[in-house]
Image: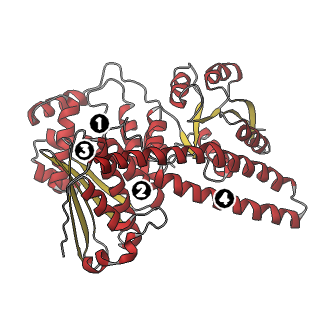
Amino acid sequence: MTPKVRVLLADDHAIVLEGLRALVDGEPDLQVVGSTTDGTAVADLVVQLRPDVVVLDLELAGIRGTEVLAALRALKEPPKVLILTAYNDGESIRSALDAGAEGLALKTQSPQQTIAAIRQVHAGQLVFPQAARRWLEERAGSGRGGREGADLTQREREVWALVARGLPNSEIAKKLGLSANTVKFHVQHLFHKLGVKNRTAAALKHASAERPSPSPGQPRTGGLSRFP
Amino acid sequence: MPSRKRDAPSKASRRLLAANERELGRIVLDMHDGPVQDIFAALSQLQVLDRALEHDEASQRRVRQAMALLERVLGEIRNFIGAFRPPGFERRELAEIIEGLAVQHETLTDQVVQLTVAPNVGECALETKIALYRILQEALANGFRHSGATRQAVTVERRAETITLAVSDDGRGFSTRQVLAREEDVGVEGGHFGLRGIQDRVAMLGGTFTLTSVVGKGTTMTIALPAE
């Protein structure tokens, strides 16, 4: 028999914890191993109880949900983290992504969605709204450790590669199906992120970044390929 | 047919804009801390009950009716919070809140937002930031409800001390004269303040408003506001 997925619940509303615990425990493949309303206790509980998935409220009292996430990320064997929040605005999605959560579920949707999301993040998927794809791409890019251009977006990488081949903006625009203005915008961002002033310098950096890095950082996530 | 409006800003109306946002923030927080948590918890418990009633079809039907009602309420609260929660105007930069709004719009509507924010946009007065955000929010909602287009393009630029926001679509278009003259547009319906409201906000800050629309071709709204 497959072992049950071990779930830790952290939410500063006791009434939510009580409801979710009953619901999760009723699922044949899930099991609540602990729950807390105290955000500062989460990291210790994770070490002690070794959950597979932590369901974490982003609006905890006393400590920011993102700080708890950072503490979990620093653990030797970090659990998967599913953020549970009432807010599906850009800021909440962004901070969950930036802090390294595997997914986001909403308190303004049926709790069944939370249950489904627990299973998905445990299975290795990133569970975020499709609209967050541009930020996911950035995150996939930034997982490449200390390499040159590690914080570039997918689009900026494409533009960079074409700049390195000596193409003018108008040609790049044609190749990528963008307007010349949009390319100009990406090129400006690219120069800023690379810390260069012109196309030649950007091209040189591209050549050196193409060589294997002496100690490539391990991407923490599999990036977009795991996006549902 | 273009239509323009220019007016002198008043300090009192500028202060009013910021005060409104603070009040909205408080209301949203109350919704979050009370009803959202309670309803989510109640739904969790009802799901458990639903499972326990597997052999009592009549009771199960009643439970499911209750769940459907509560989910509907949650959906309404989700829309309310999405429309009214201020996105941290004082903490976050203009480009960041605009990007967050674009993602939020895509999440709620599945309509694509092609966003271009010039890298030199920088920071602006709090009132300008609030106005740009609320106007863009309204323009995107209008474009979603009326244009029939699958995507909208948003451009934010800065020229000297003026910030320009342009929102366009290639949807069905309309007669600007008729729509702008229509009295109904004055009211606030479902959290939307309409084109009238957009013009009022622009006028309060001493900016300009331009609306061009061609039936069958699409619509472009451009507003320019003083950055400070």
Foreground disc of the pair 3, 2: 2
Q: Residue at x 47, y 58 (%)?
A: B108
Q: Which mark is residue A158?
A: 3
Identity, as a three-letter code, of the amino acid under mark 3: Glu
A126 or B197, which lies in front? B197
Picture residue at 34% right of the left edge, 45% below the top:
B15
Q: CA distance from mark 1 to mark 3?
A: 10 Å
| Badge nearest the viewer, 4 or 3 | 4
Say which amino acid is labelled 4: Glu
**Which secondary structure, mark 3?**
helix
* Image vertical order of residue A45 relative to residue B80, above or below: above
Q: Is residue B182 visible?
A: yes
Give the label on residue B71, or none: 4
| Mark 1: few/some/many CA within 10 Å (<14, 14-19, 20+) | many
Residue type beneath disc 2: His
**How many residues crowd mark 3 within 10 Å: few (<14), some (14–19), many (20+)?**
some
Q: Is residue B81 left or right of residue B139?
A: right
Secondary element at image label 4 = helix
Do callouts 1 and 3 point to residues on the same chain? yes
Q: For the residues tagged 1 and 2, is the chain the same?
A: no
- Give the residue pinned by disc 1: A152
Residue A140 drawn at (x, y percent): 40, 37
Residue A56 picture location, percent across and down: 61, 34
- For disc 2, the marked residue is B105
Instruction: Look at the picture and state if A49 lies above or below B41.
Output: above
Q: Is residue A72 left or right of residue B66?
A: left
Q: Nearer the viewer, mark 1 or mark 2?
A: 2
Is the Cβ of the residue at disc 4 closer than 8 Å to that at disc 3? no
Instruction: Work out how far the residue at label 3 is from the one at label 2, CA to CA, in angstroms.
Output: 26 Å
